[in-house]
């Protein structure tokens, strides 16, 4: 699924959710503490969570040692094997 190309304000759409009484009261209290209404609080929290989920799919964090090993692995030429030589000697499907 593609991300929206713009964050321009458009006509709001309704999303309905079911929560328990406890969950509703907790959300309302937290919203009040932040000076927001319930909808603003829930939307902001959901957007933060969505961004975190997507960021975790895009960014990979490793320490310097692992990154150096990664760079070494991608910079090193692949040793020629019979299968690799055969692959490069064959004609590409789009060239036919």
Image: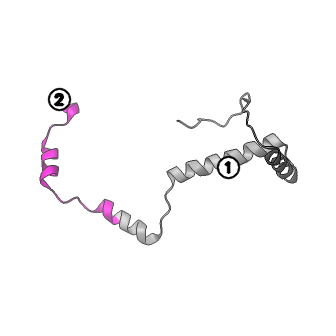
Quadrant hosting residue 74: bottom left
Magenta part of the chain:
72-96
Task: Say whether residue 90 is left or right of residue 4.
Answer: left
Task: Say whether residue 81 is left or right of residue 11.
Answer: left
**Residue 90 magenta-highlighted:** yes
Q: Position of residue 49 (x, y in %)?
A: 65, 49
Rendered position, 13 above or below 28: above
Numbered mark located on residue 11 in the image:
none
Quadrant hosting residue 95: top left
Q: Residue at the far top: name it.
A: 11
Chief SS of the magenta region: helix
Give the residue at x 68% y 34%.
8
**Residue 62 magenta-highlighted:** no
> Is 39 or 75 nearer to us in this picture?
39
Q: Position of residue 45 (x, y in %)?
A: 72, 48
Neighbor class of circle 1 (other Cα within 10 Å; few <14, some 14-19, many 20+) is few
Total residue callouts: 2
Disc 1 to disc 2, how far (Cα)?
49 Å
Disc with the residue nearer the chain's start (1 vs 2): 1
Numbered mark located on residue 48 in the image:
1
Give the residue at x 72% y 33%.
15
Say which residue label 2 marks: 96
- Which secondary structure, mark 1? helix
- Which secondary structure, mark 2? loop
Give the residue at x 69% y 45%.
46
Q: Position of residue 33 (x, y in %)?
A: 87, 54
């Amino acid at each position: 699924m593609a991300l929206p190309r713009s964050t321009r304000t458009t006509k709001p759409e309704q999303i309905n959710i079911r929560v328990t009484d406890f969950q509703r009261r907790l959300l309302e209290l937290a919203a009040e503490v932040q000076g927001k209404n319930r909808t603003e609080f829930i939307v902001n929290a959901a957007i933060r969570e969505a961004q975190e989920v997507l960021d975790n799919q895009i960014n990979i964090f490793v320490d310097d040692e692992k990154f150096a090993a990664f760079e070494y692995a991608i910079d090193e030429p692949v040793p020629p094997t019979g299968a690799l030589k055969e692959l490069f000697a064959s004609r590409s499907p789009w060239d036919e």
